[in-house]
Amino acid sequence: MHENDAHDLSPPQCSSAMRLHEMLLEGNLGEYAEHALQSSRHFKDQYQSLRACDDYYDALVNSNNNVAASQDRKKAAWTSYSAYLDCIGKALCEKPLLEWKACISSVKIGKKHIQECAQTKRLLERCLRSKSEEILRASQPQVFRPNAVP
C-alpha cells in the first residue's frame, strides 16, 4: 500500500458542516440566526436542505450508543457518517459530492487508483468548509458585516 493510500481511503471530512449543524440544533446561534437564514433569498434553500439532514446528524452523533461489539460500533459509525456525508453533501455541495462518488465508483471497478480521487475529495472538503462558513456568516449579519473592513 502506498503511504498516501490510507489517507486517500478515509472519507471526506465534514467537521465544519457538523459543527454548524450542531450549533443550529442546540440553538447556539439563536432565533435571529434561524430567521436570517429562513428569510434569505440566497441561503433559504441551503438552510432548508441542511435542516433536512437533522435526523442523519442525530444518527451519527448517537451511532455508538446501543451497539455492543467494537466492530459493530465501527460499522454503525461508518454507516451513519456515510449517510450524513451524503445528505450534507447533496444539501451544500452536490456537484463535488457526485464527482467524488463517481471517482470512488471507478476505483471499486478497477478503472482508477484511489489516489486519483484525492483531488475530488479535497474539492468536496473545501466546498463543505466554504459553504458552512457562508451559512454561518449569513446567520450572523450583525457579527459578519458584508462591508466591514478587517
Image (cartoon, grey):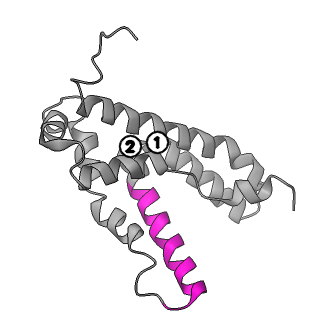
In the picture, residue 86 is in which quadrant?
A: bottom left
Question: Majority secondary structure of the magenta segment?
Answer: helix
- Residue 19 x %, y %: 39, 49
Magenta stretch in the rendered image: 68-87
Residue 83 is inside the magenta segment: yes
Residue most toward the right? 2
Answer few, some or many: residues within 10 Å of disc 1's Cα (few below 14, many 20 plus, some between 14 and 19).
Answer: many
Q: Which residue is mark 2?
A: 92
51 on left or right of 150: left
Tag 2: amino acid: Leu
Query: Foreground: 66 or 9?
Result: 66
SS for tag 2? helix
Answer few, some or many: residues within 10 Å of disc 2's Cα (few below 14, many 20 plus, some between 14 and 19).
Answer: many
In the picture, residue 146 is in which quadrant?
A: top left
Residue most toward the bottom? 68
Tag 1: amino acid: Leu
Residue 14 is inside the magenta segment: no
95 on left or right of 26: right
Q: Residue at x 52, y 42 (%)?
A: 96
93 on left or right of 145: right
Q: Are marks 2 and 1 in contact (CB under 8 Å)?
A: yes
Q: Residue at x 28, y 60 (%)?
A: 54
Res. 128 mark: 1
Is 113 drawn above or below residue 108 in the view shown? Answer: above
- Residue 61 x %, y %: 39, 68
Q: Residue at x 67, y 40 (%)?
A: 119
Q: Quadrant of the C terminus?
A: top left
SS for tag 1? helix
- Residue 133 x %, y %: 39, 34
Query: Foreground: 37 or 69?
Result: 69
